[in-house]
Image: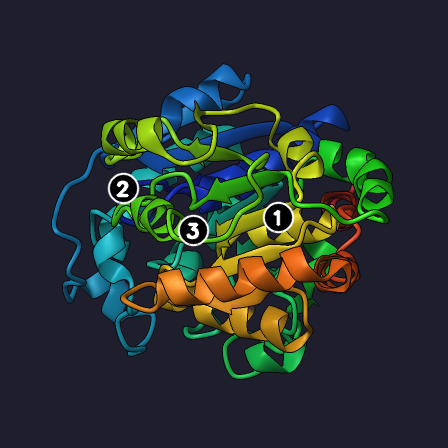
């Protein structure tokens, strides 16, 4: 089976889309598939990382500010409104489809997978002739699609949310049971859940995504300085290699009241999470990783497109929500007091989180992809 994947990373959109596609690609390759990525060269792209994992990666140039322009190719397909995130593309949809066409024509994929908020049914219809089947990965339910299979790994999402956005014969996989997690999370799930049977607060993990373009990490560290963390607590900050505030955060950690380390581009996130007692983390793809391991989490929403998932997790008791701004230090202090005064607070958060996903979503999705192709 051959699979082409159209996905981007950038300082603006972060790394989550590429990382979840890489996870799926690794699982498919392990079962004998061949995968090829198509990505634009935005600042903060992950083309080198994709290639280092052994995958083919085709680079497309950033050709414009990506304000959707009218064109005969797009107009002939439909009159849908421009996607809200169209400025993330670096080209018009017609330009992007035209650039992808020769790559797909040569590769002749069984599946074309697209994971991009700036692309919709117009792009998909232009490229359907160049693949046997088309899959969309989405979590917004805000634009039309023309696909055979749609995946939304968000907890609380229902297939009905996409009824107005896709063809009647499209199969929709919805819910966090399909979360695309690397196999090491499922492998460490039992260990992680067992060590939480005796709640403690000695290891605090801070992870605000692969980019953290607005330096939420720095705000959290500043707020923590006035929080009643145990004297023997150790803090680990995880940042991406492209994080623009990395040097400032490293400087900031040098005089924290507790031992604090900064790890960059880690390869053992599952082990780090499993060995942590509490996380302060951004909403987004890492939410499902923390839930799989039952890691109690204080969650911050860093982008509007994270709000639905964060709200759903908070309603399920799987996270404690915090707000950036002047009240962050007070909210964090309240949380630290709660989990320090009572073992039940940490225990309850972890137990609720662990019910969200078992970490085997990638296997479920890859099963579906292989079942849809006559090998």
Q: Are marks 1 and 2 in contact (CB under 8 Å)?
A: no
Q: Residue at x 51, y 66 (%)?
A: 334
N-terminal-most mark, 3 or 1: 3
Count of numbered marks: 3
- Of circles 1 and 2, the one toward us is 1
Instruction: Tell me if I can see residue 32 in this picture.
Output: no
User: Residue visible at 67% across and 65% down?
Assistant: 318
- Residue in the image at 43% along x and 58% along y: 124
> Crowding at label 3, few (<14), some or many (≥20) Cα neighbours within 10 Å?
some
Q: Which residue is mark 1?
A: 278
Whether 231 is drawn above or below 160: the answer is above
Residue 113, horizontal then vertical, whole percent: 53, 47
Label 2: few (<14), some or many (≥20) within 10 Å? some
Circle nearer the N terminus (1, 2): 2
* Residue bearing mark 3: 127
Residue drawn at 69 percent across, 74 percent down? 316
Residue 162: x percent and y percent? 56, 77
- In the image: residue 79, left or right of residue 323: left
Question: Which one is in front, 327 or 9?
Answer: 327
Residue 345 placement (x, y as % from top left):
71, 64
Graded by Cα atoms within 10 Å as few (under 14), some (14 to 19) or many (20 or more), the crowding at tag 1 reads many
Q: Which residue is mark 2?
A: 11
- Residue 298 sits in quarter: bottom right
């Amino acid at each position: 089976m051959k699979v082409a994947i159209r996905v981007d990373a950038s300082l603006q959109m972060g790394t989550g889309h590429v990382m979840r596609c890489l996870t799926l690609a690794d699982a498919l390759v392990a079962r004998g598939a061949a995968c090829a990525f198509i990505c634009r060269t935005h600042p903060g792209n992950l083309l080198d990382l994709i290639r280092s994992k052994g995958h083919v990666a085709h680079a497309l140039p950033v050709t414009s500010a990506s304000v959707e322009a009218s064109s005969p190719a797009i107009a002939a397909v439909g009159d849908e409104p421009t996607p809200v995130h169209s400025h993330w593309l670096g080209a018009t949809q017609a330009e992007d489809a035209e650039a992808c066409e020769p790559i797909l024509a040569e590769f002749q994929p069984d599946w074309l997978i697209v994971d991009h908020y700036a692309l919709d049914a117009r792009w998909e219809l232009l490229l359907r002739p160049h693949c046997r089947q088309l899959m969309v990965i989405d979590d917004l339910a805000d634009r039309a699609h023309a696909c055979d299979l749609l995946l939304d790994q968000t907890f609380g999402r229902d297939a009905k949310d996409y009824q107005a956005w896709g063809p009647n014969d499209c199969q929709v996989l919805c819910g966090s049971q399909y979360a695309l997690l690397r196999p090491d999370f499922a492998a460490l799930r039992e260990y992680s859940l067992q060590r939480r049977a005796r709640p403690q607060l000695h290891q605090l993990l801070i992870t605000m995504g692969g980019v953290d373009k607005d330096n939420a990490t720095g705000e959290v560290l500043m707020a923590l300085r006035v929080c009643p963390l145990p004297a023997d607590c150790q803090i680990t900050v995880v940042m991406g290699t492209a994080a623009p505030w990395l040097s400032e955060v490293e400087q900031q950690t040098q005089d924290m009241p507790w031992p604090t380390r900064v790890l960059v581009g880690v390869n053992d996130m599952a082990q780090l999470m499993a060995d942590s007692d509490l996380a302060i983390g951004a909403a987004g793809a890492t939410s499902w990783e923390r839930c799989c391991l039952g890691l109690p989490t204080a969650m911050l929403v860093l982008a509007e497109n994270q709000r639905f998932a964060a709200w759903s997790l908070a309603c399920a008791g799987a996270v404690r929500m915090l707000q950036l701004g002047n009240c962050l230090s007070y909210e964090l202090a309240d949380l630290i007091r709660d989990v320090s005064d009572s073992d039940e607070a940490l225990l309850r958060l972890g137990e609720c989180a662990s019910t969200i996903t078992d970490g085997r979503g990638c296997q479920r999705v890859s099963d579906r992809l292989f079942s849809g192709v006559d090998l």
